[in-house]
Image (spheres, grey):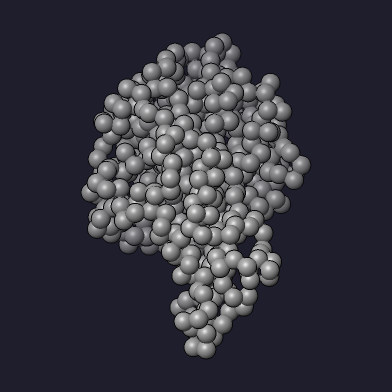
Amino acid sequence: MRNPAITLLIAFFPFPVLAQKTTAPDAAVKAVRQYRQENEDRIMRELREFLAIPNVASDTVNIQKNAERLQGMLEARGIETHLLSIEGRGPVVFGKLETPGAKRTVIFYAHYDGQPVDAAAWTDKSPFEPILYDDAMEAGGKRIPFPAPSGVPHYKDDWRIYARSASDDKSPIVAMLATLDALNEKKIPLSVNLKVIFEGEEEAGSEHLQQTLELHKNLLAADVLLTGDGPVHQNGRPLIFFGNRGVIGVDVTVYGPVRALHSGHYGNWAPNPALELSRLLAAMKDENGRVKIPGYYDDVAPLGEAEKKALAELPDYDAELEKELGIAKPDGGGKKLAELIMEPSLNIRGLRSAYVGEQAQNVIPDRAEASLDARLVKGEDPKEKSRQILEFIRQQGFFIVDREPTMQERRTHPKVAKVIEQGGYRASRTRMDLPVSKAIVGVMKNIEGDVVIAPTLGGSVPMYVFEDLGLPWLGVPIVNYDNHQHSSDENLRLGHFWRGMETYGALLAGLNW
């Protein structure tokens, strides 16, 4: 049964759009803004209903519900839609909207799954209940009710919606669809054919995206792909990025006695795995954050002249970030954040051993666990990076297994580590001097004036899949940088959401190359 809100959309927004022509970007912006001001309640209702569906990639039942909701949202706008799936995995939602006379095709990519949640860590304990605040929590924002529908603009720019995937990535999806509604109602045609690809396991490593798309190559003919993933620049200005880092994950478990022991009876005698793991992790980096694993930086591809120029022109916002985040001395040995993003990283994303706080017990733990991620840059191979980390652990004297060690292994080897390689993918980058690259930068500068242009985004998005298909791609994110992406209290600043709609409108109606 179709959702009533989607049925309402069909009545108000019949597609397809009018015959193709290029519209001045500023005219598209004006039209989208006017539509938004007239339809804020409708747009917010669609976003809130979408956010209310839990979307952790491992929750296959709710991932399927998300995909089916997206299918309805696309079909309501006259977009030909298919759910592309591999058995047991979240579907890739594919949509196609033809524009009469258009000579170019743009694919828009985003993901509809989100990071796992710990409800207890959220201020309101409700990751999948969209909650409205009148400002950021850190700025003293207070929880307020969603306003009653009124037909006039009443959502303030500084208001924020708190919910998992409010920024990463459900809001760019809704912004894109609302932009289509706006252009249609204001009789502004698209200048391109549009295809959309919405993925349901990006936060789980996009393990099956390439396999799924390879099975449906016939659907993917296009001239460029745009992704809405990621935030705007930390200085608040719109961002265009031409690359992203790759990523791998590695889990390490170090073992002590087969059971936790009384720290008084056995302290100074029984090896402590938490201490052993701490030594291992500390050995991986120097005091400036430089990775000490042999060969770690050897395969980094040098930047081209266009990338070097863009990097040199990036705004220096480090001092403001240090103040905001309470950092006295950043890692990096004096290098700027923008420079460090161009290098591979190694991060401890979680540690666990026995208990702390009110649950602390006077024990020697039986094990200690760490979860690592490494961000890769252009030129690096994920398998080689995992091998380097594995070999370093071995060189520190650990006997390595990929399962729970046997009692005989524990008795034989003083240091035992279980290492689980989670896989990952390589970095990707599009040339900045391509005609389409220049055209997108031109549209953005037309409507924004001051646009931040970055060779690479710090985060990871599976753009290598599209690179392998021969598609140039660029990132045009719209959400606020302080969105708590990947952590508790994820949020969306509404002023960024509204401006994002206008950005998408200018690109869809004014892009020409």
Q: Residue at x 28, y 34 (%)?
A: 314
* Left or right relative to 224: residue 3: right
Image vertical order of residue 204 relative to residue 298, above or below: below
Pick out the residue farthest to the front: 412
Residue 220: quadrant of the picture: top right
State the residue in front, 265 or 458.
Answer: 265
* Left or right relative to 503: residue 222: right
Image vertical order of residue 184 relative to residue 60, above or below: above
Return the x and y of residue 477 as percentages of the image width and height: 43, 37
Quarter holding the C terminus? top left
Return the x and y of residue 428 as percentages of the image width and height: 49, 31
Q: Residue at x 36, y 23 (%)?
A: 304
Image vertical order of residue 370 relative to residue 374, above or below: below
State the residue in front, 160 or 127.
Answer: 127
Task: Report if residue 361 is visible in the image.
Answer: no
Quarter holding the N terminus? top right
Return the x and y of residue 410 as percentages of the image width and height: 63, 69
Pick out the residue farthest to the bottom: 265
State the residue in front, 151 or 368.
Answer: 368
